[in-house]
Image (cartoon, rainbow, N blue to C red):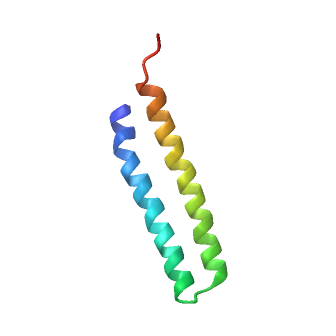
Amino acid sequence: MTDVLRMLIPVAVGAVAVVLLMGLWNMMRGGSSSRSQTLMRWRVGLQFLAVVIVMALLYLTTSTP
């Protein structure tokens, strides 16, 4: 289980970075503000998912006394 989570962390962080860059690109070229808003909402959701994955990995790998 921890191996799967370790592999998912870079995927989740990469997805956040891609959506962030897409949103910034859309704003820089003067694109639709509703599209930028949608992309930024996706970014927040993906960040939440990435944090959940990291916390789950930390929970599963920490030793309990």
Residue pushed farthest top? 65
Quadrant housing residue 40: bottom right
Q: Residue 63: image x %, image y %? A: 42, 18
Q: Decide: is 16 above or below 36.
A: above
Work out which residue is located at the far bottom of the displayed protein and give it: 30
Looking at the rendering, which quadrant does residue 41 occupy? Answer: bottom right
- Residue 59, given in percent of the width and then of the height, sits at 48, 28
Q: Position of residue 53 (x, y in %)?
A: 48, 41
Residue drawn at (34%, 44%) of the image: 7
Q: Is residue 12 above or below residue 24?
A: above
Query: x and y percent of residue 62 in the render?
Result: 43, 23
Residue at coordinates 48% horizontally, 60% vertically from top-left?
Answer: 16
- Quarter of the image for residue 17 reads bottom left
Judge from the rendering whether residue 26 lies leftward or rightward of residue 63; answer left or right. right
- Residue at 44% x, 67% y is 18
Q: Residue at x 58, y 63 (%)?
A: 42
State the quadrant of the N terminus: top left
Q: How many marks?
A: 0
